[in-house]
């Protein structure tokens, strides 16, 4: 027998007819003999409407009363769906979050799930009932022993469903929604965005802004961490939708379902070499030519970092396996011969990475990594960040010490540590999806001292003020006094707070100064096959160059290549990058019935 968790969002239960249609779908699965736990959101725009009501009564309503109010929306839909099932002859029972025993933190309005009791649901399933559970809500014990109603944060029903699937060890968790699944990019900006049949949770998290429009990111994190079989599909059709896969599967149990350590892997890759091209012209086409030529020579580049500098020149730094160093130097030399600029190369490095769901979204984790290395007196040569991974390139001689310190600091188990893993993603596409992030800004800190602890100090100051960073780029170029520049990409909304947070540090470093960019956009190509293939970056840069778009900053991580461009170029950049990887198609339009 198969246990299914199905979740229907607000639009899918937005009217009496739609609730009936959901009941019919559930009834069909029941006829197939499946056990079903059905999670529903509040009908249509109910949640928005009751929030508006509250605001009319009180501009700053108490959080506890807000949760009391918000939870009512889901209570309406569970009862109605259970009634609809009854009228179709299907035995069903509705349950609120507190009735099930979905224990959460006590933070009203954004509580994370700690634990889910499974016995009450299982008993009802054994009685042959479909269990209809209210999404988005849970309960926490107040100090005087009364159980309080909590909510998980807007869009939290997805999280409820996936957490229930994890706790119940369900065979599949299906999220029914009003789109056909996860698309290769935003269909409002790229008309031939295509439906994906499959995507890994890691890729989905890397495509954060794209993924978030389909699924609550916390739901993806839970699916990734506990290996939940997750499917996103349309409520209006029988099309299979998109399947989300995960390789990591820790057991549910210790430490709070949503609270486990965010770092669950440490990786070391030895024998790395750094090539740094500096003072090359800042104009479209240079990065394209460099990385195309490297790819033609069969060189697989790992990290790429490009930072712009005052005065209109660029530096591009990248890493390759040490065995490719000589060839990569020859190729780079030939490229800069006609352009001007200098090349510096150096072997003897190690890349050390931590991985886990939503690392960059949790301010403080990257900072802890940098602080841990700083405490060992280790200098960071390059930094690469992404949603699921933060990497540092350090001297090989410090590798062993660093690995030990990092695994202790993040308390990872032996089984979660890998040294020199084989390249992953042979059979995966090099790019599966492309996302555009706007409303971002680049902050550059010029003339920071080049010594251990600098990145740690900067990132800690930002983390202490709860400012999340999208990327951290430490440039290779040294100023005459030996100092360097570090840039951050962050949300426009955090810019002023970041300036304030960094001011005391800058005051301590002679000559250090802060520069804000104009509004920028970031285009990110993501694919699990990227590490195994040479030439992905070159193709992306070529597409941008051919569209005459200048790349301000390049930052890569294992399965993501991101380019920062002027905000006005954002949509064009998204379109050309999506097209250059052949991601367009008509499947999605067919799924929409157009
Ligand atoms: N009803 C809640 C909201 O609108 C939860 C959900 O729909 O996922 O945010
Ligand atoms: Mg939703």
Image (cartoon, grey):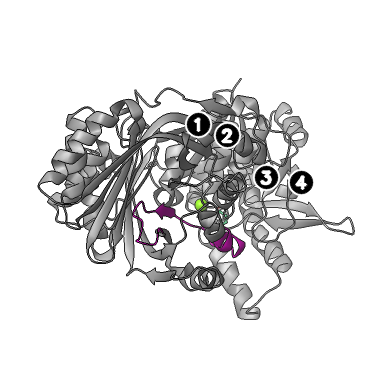
| Farthest-out residue, front | 481
Q: Nearer the viewer, mark 3 or mark 1?
A: 1
| Residue 319, horizontal then vertical, whole percent | 34, 38
In screen coordinates, is 228 left or right of 75?
Answer: left
Query: What's the CA distance linking mark 3 and mark 2?
Result: 24 Å
Q: Is mark 2 within 8 Å of ligand 1?
A: no
The residue where tag 1 is placed is 268
Q: Residue at x 24, y 33 (%)?
A: 328
Q: Of helix, strand and loop, which one carries label 1?
A: strand
Q: Are marks 4 and 2 in contact (CB under 8 Å)?
A: no
Could one spot residue 258 in this view of the protein? yes
Indicate which disc, 2 or 1, sits on the residue closer to the N terminus. 1
CA distance separating discs 4 and 3: 22 Å
Residue 131: mark? none
CB contact under 8 Å: marks 3 and 2: no
Point out which mark residue 403 bears: 2
Q: Nearer the viewer, residue 302 or 99?
A: 302
At a point 28% along the width and 43% down the height, the residue shown is 344
Q: Which residue is mark 4?
A: 99
């Amino acid at each position: 027998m198969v246990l299914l968790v199905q979740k229907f969002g607000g639009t899918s239960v937005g009217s009496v007819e739609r609730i009936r249609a959901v009941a019919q779908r559930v009834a069909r699965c029941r006829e197939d003999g499946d056990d079903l736990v059905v999670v529903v959101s509040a009908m249509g725009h109910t949640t928005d409407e009751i929030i508006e009501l509250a605001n009319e009564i009180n501009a700053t309503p108490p959080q506890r009363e807000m949760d009391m109010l918000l939870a009512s929306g889901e209570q309406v839909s569970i009862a109605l769906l259970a009634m609809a099932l009854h009228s179709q002859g299907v035995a069903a029972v509705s349950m609120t979050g507190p009735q099930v025993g979905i224990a959460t933190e006590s933070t009203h309005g954004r509580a994370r799930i700690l634990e889910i009791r499974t016995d009450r649901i299982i008993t009802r399933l054994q009685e042959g009932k479909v269990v209809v559970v209210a999404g988005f809500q849970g309960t926490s014990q107040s100090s005087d022993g009364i159980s309080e109603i909590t909510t998980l944060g807007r869009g939290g029903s997805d999280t409820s469903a996936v957490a229930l699937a994890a706790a119940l060890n369900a065979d599949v968790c299906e999220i029914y929604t009003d789109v056909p699944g996860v698309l290769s990019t935003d269909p409002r900006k790229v008309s031939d965005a295509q439906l994906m049949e499959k995507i890994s949770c890691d890729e989905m998290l890397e495509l954060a802004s794209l993924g978030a429009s389909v699924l609550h990111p916390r739901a993806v994190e839970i699916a990734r961490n506990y290996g939940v079989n997750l499917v996103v599909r349309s409520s209006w059709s029988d099309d299979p939708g998109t399947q989300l896969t995960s390789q990591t599967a820790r057991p549910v149990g210790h430490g709070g379902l949503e609270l486990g350590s965010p770092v669950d892997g440490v990786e070391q890759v030895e024998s790395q070499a750094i090539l740094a091209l500096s003072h090359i012209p800042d104009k479209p086409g240079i990065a394209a030519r460099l990385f195309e030529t490297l790819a033609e020579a069969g060189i697989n580049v790992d990290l790429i970092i490009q930072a712009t500098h005052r005065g209109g020149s660029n530096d591009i730094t990248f890493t390759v396996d040490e065995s490719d160093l000589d060839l990569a130097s020859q190729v780079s030399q030939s490229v800069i011969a006609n352009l001007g600029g200098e090349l510096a190369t150096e072997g003897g490095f190690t890349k050390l990475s931590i991985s886990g769901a939503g690392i960059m979204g949790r301010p403080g984790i990257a900072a802890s990594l940098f602080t841990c290395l700083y405490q060992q007196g280790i200098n960071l040569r390059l930094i690469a960040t992404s949603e699921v991974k933060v990497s540092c390139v350090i001297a090989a001689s410090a590798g062993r010490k660093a690995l030990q310190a990092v695994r202790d600091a993040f308390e990872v188990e032996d089984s979660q540590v890998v040294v020199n893993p084989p390249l992953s993603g042979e059979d995966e596409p090099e790019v599966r999806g492309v996302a555009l992030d706007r409303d971002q800004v680049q902050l550059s800190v010029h003339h920071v001292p080049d010594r251990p602890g600098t990145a740690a100090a900067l990132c800690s100051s930002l983390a202490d003020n709860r400012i999340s960073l999208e990327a951290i780029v430490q440039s290779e170029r040294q100023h005459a006094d030996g100092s360097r520049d570090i840039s951050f990409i962050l949300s426009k909304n955090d810019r002023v707070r970041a300036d304030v947070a960094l001011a005391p540090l800058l005051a301590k470093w002679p000559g250090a100064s802060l520069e804000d960019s104009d509004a920028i956009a970031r285009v990110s190509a993501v694919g699990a096959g990227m590490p195994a293939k040479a030439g992905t970056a070159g193709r992306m840069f070529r597409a941008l160059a051919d569209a005459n778009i200048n790349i301000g900053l390049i930052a890569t991580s294992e399965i993501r290549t991101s380019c920062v461009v002027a905000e006005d170029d954002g949509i064009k950049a998204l379109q050309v990058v999506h097209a250059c990887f052949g991601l367009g198609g008509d499947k999605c339009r067919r799924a929409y019935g157009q």
